Amino acid sequence: MIHFIQFSQNILTELTHDLALEAKADRLGLMIGTAGLVAKSNWDNLPAVAGNTYAVKDTLKANGARWNGLAKAWTFPTLEALAVAVNAIPEVN
């Protein structure tokens, strides 16, 4: 049986301590956190981006993100991949 874990914003923030990444995500209307699933007693809680992602979905996908529809968030295999993806999004002034 598979159970999906909803997006949680605060868990990843405590792990990263990357204030510049968090600030950029906030300016872009994004939230950094975790989302995942539990299957056969394996917990796979992945770094994730949620929020206003429609305009940047192609950049997220090009940098390894996968859509988790139940969590309504883009998940990444590693925290480093998430950082690369967020930093690849240009900011418009």
Image (cartoon, helix red, strand yellow):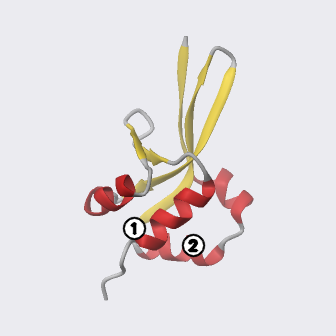
Q: How many marks?
A: 2
- Residue at point 36%, 78% (across, down): 90
Name the amino acid, label 2: Leu
Q: Secondary structure at mark 2?
A: helix
Q: Does residue 42 sit above or below 85 in this rendering?
A: above
Q: Circle 2: is it few (<14), some (14-19), or many (20+) Cα within 10 Å? A: some
- Residue at point 63%, 33% (across, down): 44
Question: In which quadrant of the rendered image does the C terminus lie?
Answer: bottom left
Q: Nearer the viewer, residue 47 or 52?
A: 47
The picture places residue 53, in percent across and down from the top left corner, at 34, 58
**Can you tell which quarter of the image residue 54 is in?**
bottom left
Q: Nearer the viewer, residue 76 or 4?
A: 76
Q: Nearer the viewer, residue 88 or 68?
A: 88
What label sits on residue 76 in the rendered view? none
Question: In which quadrant of the rendered image does the N terminus lie?
Answer: top right
- Residue at point 34%, 60% (across, down): 52
The picture places residue 70, in percent across and down from the top left corner, at 41, 32
The picture places residue 45, in percent across and down from the top left corner, at 62, 38
The picture places residue 50, in percent across and down from the top left corner, at 44, 53
**Can you tell which quarter of the image residue 29 is in?**
bottom left
- Residue at point 51%, 66% (across, down): 84
- In this picture, residue 93 sits left or right of residue 16: left
Query: Where is mark 2, residue-wise?
Result: 21
Q: Circle 1: is it few (<14), some (14-19), or many (20+) Cα within 10 Å? A: few
- In this picture, residue 62 sits left or right of residue 79: left
Query: Where is mark 1, residue-wise?
Result: 29
Residue occupying the far left of the picture = 55
Q: Secondary structure at mark 1?
A: loop
Name the amino acid, label 1: Gly
Distance (Cα) linking label 1 and label 2:
12 Å
Observer-side mark, 1 or 2, equals 2
Determine contact: label 1, label 2, CB under 8 Å: no
